[in-house]
Image (tube, grey):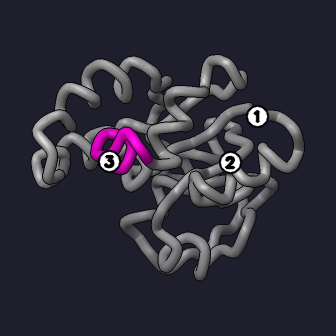
Amino acid sequence: MILFLDTSVLLAAAGSDQGASRFIFVQAEVCGWQLTSSGYCLQEAKRNLGKLPNSGDIEAWSTIIEPSLRVVADAVTLPRPLVFPRAKDRPVVISGLAAKADVLLTLDRVDFHSALGTQIYGMAIRTPAEFLIEQRRAGRI
């Protein structure tokens, strides 16, 4: 299963070893999840990494987060319409679709969930916690 992680999930995974975002990184290999993000998300996360409160965040980033990611090329156009008002977040959605992600993981409920709902063109949109709950209910973890 291909999971596309937006910036908020990358930062949450680096910032806390107790949350759902980090759990996804820890369990990815065992569960067969391919963790994917784009250069756009990666660079945005790196710019904001220093704003996280814990000093261990940079170590977690370099030892857990970055090595686990398959980074795909940024995509900015689709061969079909996309009505999405947040110009800043359009490359995230489009890159996730271009990467053929099964799920876009984001903590940004306002810009993604409210604007797009629970899926777009077959790609589910979930928070890490929602995704993990679904996986547990399906008996996959």
Quadrant position of residue 87: bottom left
Residue at the image position 33 percent from the left and 45 percent from the top: 16
Q: Residue furthest right?
A: 138
Element at badge 1?
loop
Q: Are marks 3 and 2 in contact (CB under 8 Å)?
A: no
Label 3 Cα crowd, 10 Å radius (few <14 / some 14-19 / many 20+): many
Residue sitting at x 46%, y 26%: 69
Between 43 and 77, the one lying in front of the other is 43
Residue 132 appears left or right of 37: right
Q: Residue 11, labelled with which disc?
A: 3
Can you identify the residue that label 2 sits on? 132
Amino acid bearing label 3: Leu
The label on residue 141 is: 1
* Label 1 vs 2, first from the N-terminus: 2
Q: Are marks 1 and 2 in contact (CB under 8 Å)?
A: yes
The answer to the question of whether label 1 and label 3 lie on touching residues, with beta carbons closer than 8 A, is no
The stretch in magenta equals 12-18
Q: Nearer the viewer, mark 1 or mark 3?
A: 1
Q: Is residue 16 magenta?
A: yes
Instruction: Measure the C-alpha gap from mark 1 to mark 3.
Output: 23 Å
Q: Secondary structure at mark 3?
A: helix
Judge the density around disc 1: few (<14), some (14-19), many (≥20) Cα neighbours within 10 Å: few
- Relative horizontal placement of residue 47, taking residue 131 as reference (left or right): left
103 left or right of 138?
left
User: From the viewer's perspective, is residue 117 above or below residue 120?
Assistant: below
Amino acid carrying label 1: it is Ile
Label 2: which secondary element: helix
Q: Earlier in the sequence, mark 1 or mark 3?
A: 3
Q: Up-down: is 107 above or below 68?
A: below
Residue 120: image location, x then y, percent: 73, 63
Which residue sits at x=27%, y=30%?
Answer: 61
Q: Identify the image quadrant of the C terminus.
A: top right
